[in-house]
Amino acid sequence: VEPPEILFHGTATKYEEAIDREGLIPKSRLYVHLSGDEETARKVGIRHGKLVLYRIRSGEMHRDGFAFYRSVNGVWLIKAVPVRYMEKI
């Protein structure tokens, strides 16, 4: 599915160093989960500890050939997000 230009990923600072180095990878899940709005990403991230929020250039990723999926509950899914498409906010 074609994503919006920007998606968001909220997580905890304890994962920040690895994410900044490796990008977003699914670890034990099949896909990386992304949110369509900043507020939802904040709510997800804060559940895991002190919040860190990333803005994902999903439109650019899609144009570069990355496949996006959207779950029934509206969560955006992708296999991985390379660091070059991420911005910490």
Image (cartoon, rainbow, N blue to C red):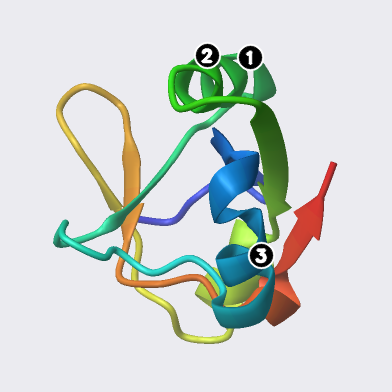
Q: Nearer the viewer, mark 1 or mark 3?
A: 3
Which of the labelled discs sits on residue 89, or is there none? none
Camera-nearest residue between 31 and 62: 31
- Quadrant (top left/top right/bottom left/bottom right) for the C terminus: top right
Camera-nearest residue between 42 and 46: 46
Q: Residue furthest bottom?
A: 64
Q: Count residues near mark 3 (Cα–Cα under 10 Å), then give few for <14, some for 14-19, many for 20+.
A: few
Q: Residue at horizontal 49%, vertical 51%?
A: 3
Q: Provide residue 9's location: percent of width, then percent of height.
A: 56, 42
Mark 3 highlights which residue?
17
Q: Amino acid at mark 3?
A: Glu
The alpha-carbon separation of the residues under discs 1 and 3 comes to 23 Å
The alpha-carbon separation of the residues under discs 3 and 2 comes to 20 Å
Above or below residue 15? Residue 81 is below
Mark with earlier residue (3, 2): 3
**Label 2 close to label 1 by CB (< 8 Å):** yes
Camera-nearest residue between 14 and 81: 14
In the visual, does 83 lie left or right of 88? left
Q: Residue at horizontal 73%, vertical 80%?
A: 84
Q: Nearer the viewer, mark 2 or mark 1?
A: 2
Mark 2 highlights which residue?
43
Mark 1 highlights which residue?
39
The alpha-carbon separation of the residues under discs 2 and 1 comes to 6 Å
Q: Residue furthest front?
A: 14
Secondary element under disc 1, as helix, strand or loop, is helix
Q: Provide residue 86's location: percent of width, then percent of height.
A: 71, 64
Above or below residue 79? Residue 21 is below
Q: Amino acid at mark 1?
A: Glu
